[in-house]
Amino acid sequence: MASETFEPTEDAAYVHRQLQLLADISDQAVAYLDTRRRFRLTNTEFDRRFGEPPKNRHAGDFFEGVCSPAVDEYLKRAVDSGESLKAQLDCSSPEGGGTDRLRLKAVPHLNEGTVVGVFVSFHETETRHSSETTDDHGPLDPADALRDHRERMARLGEMAAGLTHEIRQPLAAIINYAGVLKRRLRNDPAAEAITGLADHIVSQARRADNIVASARSMAGKGKTPRIEFDIMRVVEDCMGLVERRARKLDVDIRIGSQAKLPTLQGNPHQVEQILVNLLNNALDAMNDADKRVLSIDVDTVASTDTVRVRVSDTGPGIDADRAQRIFNSMETTKHDGMGMGLSISRALAESHDGKLWLDTQAAEGACFVLDLPLALAEIPDTQTVSA
């Protein structure tokens, strides 16, 4: 419960002066306001950063047009709730010509359980666009954490759009140079092994180019080609890409499928990207496991007209708490990971009108399931639509 105001008495004048001296020692911008959010005290750094507010000036008026989101909104919430809160703000730079990212902390002043004022502090984060959403004092306000996350994703999208154009040029050069190498070696019987390596260079460069093209399509910069393809051919190509690593880790690979699988329709390069990510994640999970088995099972689900691919490992599995966030962007347990693989993989699956999900009922390890719709020509014409 908040009182109407808090006025220092004559008996409190000494304490008030001591508080002023203490505040001036801080290198953070600090202010004290009453429950109506009117200024009572500011320190030297606050006056330097924002200018000295007249006594009794309302925070809403003082900060108007200076910070976004509005500072007064957080002060009011701290006073009304009696609880401390944190936020990140973009505030006009005192030097002009730009904005600074500041961390706000609002702490209600309690007197025998009653809110009689509120302290607020501001300090600059390490970089203008900090990616941190927590610190030693606790979590940021959820709305600000979400806003900060969206800003990071927008910047990541802008960066990716530029990179797709830049990366495709050297990839095209690699393919051309490898082609020239093959032609020059064509009439040299002793160069057969080198020609084979050139084939691999071309194959991998084209695969990388297809991945970049897929990313460009997802960003809305192009159309995603849809063709009919054999899912087992894609699975075999994926296994060829991870087989060497699996051998080094002494992983037993098991592939199972029904005798005849129907044709799928979509972008096989994007489906390959999904499966390679799942396979590499499975290998990562078994890095320290005693039992190392990687299973890929492919079959059809007649009730939903889909082909289902299950990728399972015998690693430590995924706990229930992390399972809720596993497909979120930036969610990762790898020290060098970005947390984008599963998020992108799910987006690719959904772009095919499919699904990518975690089977939480797996007997051991982790099991990811990819459902992809059949090509239209493969769906049995036995369904009727009731009027």
Image (tube, rainbow, N blue to C red):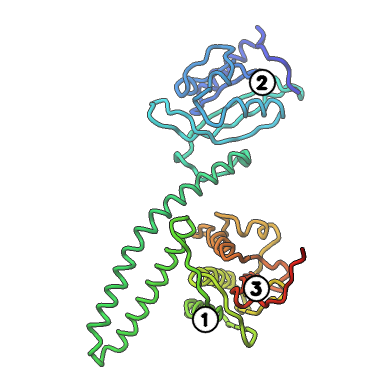
Q: For numbered disc 1, what is the local secondary structure?
A: helix
At horizontal 66% and vertical 68% (from top left) the residue drawn is 317
Q: For numbered disc 3, what is the local secondary structure?
A: strand
Q: Is residue 141 left or right of residue 159?
A: right
Q: Residues within 10 Å of mark 2 (few under 14, many from 20)?
A: many
Work out whether 19 lies above or below 156.
above
Residue 75 picture location, percent across and down: 63, 26
Q: Residues within 10 Å of mark 3 (few under 14, many from 20)?
A: many
- Mark sitting on residue 233: 1
- Mark sitting on residue 69: none
Residue indicated by mark 3? 306
Residue 243 picture location, percent across and down: 50, 80
Work out whether 45 lies above or below 249.
above
Label 2 to label 3: alpha-carbon separation: 62 Å
Q: Residue furthest top?
A: 10
Label 1 to label 3: alpha-carbon separation: 17 Å
Residue flagged by tag 1: what amino acid is it? Arg
Residue flagged by tag 2: what amino acid is it? Gly
Residue indicated by mark 2? 117
Label 1 to label 2: alpha-carbon separation: 69 Å
Q: For numbered disc 2, what is the local secondary structure?
A: strand
